[in-house]
Image (tube, coloured by chain):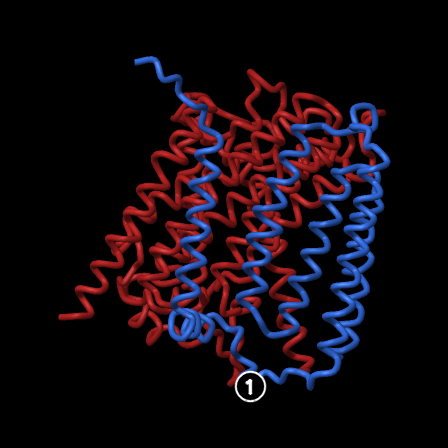
Chain colours: A red, B blue
Amino acid sequence: MDINFIIEKFLLVTILFAISLLIAMYSTYAERKVAAFLQDRLGPDRAGPFGILQPLADGIKMFMKEEIVPSNASKWLFMVGPGLAMLCACIGTAVIPWGQDLNVGGRIIPLQVTDINVGVLYLFGVVSLGVYGVMIGGWASNNKYSLLSAIRAASQNISYEVAMGLSIIALLLVTNTLSLKEIVAQQHGWHWNVIYQPLGFIIFMICSFAETNRAPFDLPECETELIGGYHTEYSSMKLGFYLFAEYINMFVSSAVMATLYFGGYNYPGMDWVATQVGPVAAPLIGTAVLFLKIFMFIFFFMWVRWTIPRFRYDQLMNLGWKGLIPLAIANIIITGIVIAVVNKF
Amino acid sequence: MGTSVFYFVATLSIIFSLMVIFSKNPIHSVLYLILTFFTFTVHYVLLNAQFLAVVNFIVYMGAIMVLFLFVLMLLNLNKENEPNKSSLVKILGVIAGGCLIVTLVGSLKAVSINTPLVLQNPNLGLVKNLGKELFGPFMLPFELSSILLLTAMVGAVLLTKKEEKANG
């Protein structure tokens, strides 16, 4: 194996990991600022100018807090839970194409860790694995509220995975491929999938909210019923890991939505820009555009959280099973018919 | 390199599946079963069956085992409320297990006599080729199995519904 190849991939993975953590850190800050803006408050403004050092202060606080393990908890699994949540949150970034291939002095460097030809299914697998961190942590705490929350998280994730998978099937009918790199390349020049799959996108987005346990579907962390939810017994950085994993999940699902439906690194007029700035800068501009789209989605996540109140549990299940799944199936059938008719004529 | 990876993963699969049987706590059993399924996924990747690998990952690890864990957490099984099994049931279990071993060993012996199966197309496991096979020559069995699954699903839904009293 080529040594340069290993160095490239290692660098890419390290950078992606660092960026995920950085974005998760500043998402906590952004969340509080957005909440403050929507509620006509100021938000954190003490640590540094505009409170920009607040996430650092929070991080140091998390590390310094006392570590408490409940005496009747299953010690080993209690530790595995947050680690697993973090792991499942981070491995999703591996298949997302972050930009076009970089051409540095004749050497082609793809801005994607790996282009497996089942990329979409891999992402789906990672999403379905994400619930284990919550379940194991909730059960190992030996607290009935944590257990209830873990069970809620499991049933919520399973229910919304079905609708999510069905909405992806309709998308695959349009794209004809499971490779994320090809899906993004196909969307070049305003062929964004959201134009062909508007209903599919809405279903996918609602399911992403449910899968990342974000409001209005944050039933596993419903304070009024379950104290703190699955992380009631957690303290110190273990709690920090759970909170961090939620923000990384949000970042990854924003990236997935931008990649699958909103053209990824494509932007209008990119061919013209590429002729102006050369082969190294153009892909990097594309990456910047992708991150811009991701930040828009993250903002949308926060906007929804501070606008729509939490669902009741039966409402959540009704929406998932009786609303989204029939809609997603109808979407598949309509997409199939339209494609068959278009191919015929 | 391929064979050493295979032996490493195979050893792990055997260790994890033994742990499934030997752990006292049912939740730990399920967690070891998840690890066992994960090693199976690695086996599929080694065999270049990417689609099967990722489907095993999604369906078994991601969905079925979550439901297992879900049910076990709800039941909250432990030593105190474990039902007492009579010795007759235990003896029957041993006999059934023994029969299974005899069948397995017998079938394995039959396999070793035959010439090993050579895969004609090593890329058969890729999604595109697999889809063409499934919806081409194997169309009928594929559709029949999907009808079977649909029937099972309808049956399960029907079983959970309470029978409405026939009061006219």
Hey, what amino acid is under mark 1?
Answer: Gln
B81 in relation to A166, above or below: above
What residue occupies the far top of the structure in this picture? B167
Q: Residue A54, image x and y in percent?
A: 61, 33
Residue lying at 45% horizontally and 28% vertically, measured from the top left: B161
Q: Please tell me whether mark 1 sits on a helix, a strand or a loop.
A: loop
Q: Which residue is mark 1?
A: B120
For the point 84% across and 43% down, which residue is it? Answer: B91
Q: Is A263 positioned to the left or the right of B15 in the image?
A: left
- Above or below, A314 relative to A270: above
- Quarter of the image where the N terminus of chain A is located: bottom right
Tell me which residue sits at (26%, 62%) in the image.
Answer: A190
Q: Position of residue A11 (x, y in %)?
A: 64, 66
Q: Position of residue A31 (x, y in %)?
A: 50, 33
Is residue A182 positioned above or below A227 on the image? below
Relative placement, left or right, of A283 versus A111 is left
Number of numbered labels in the structure image: 1
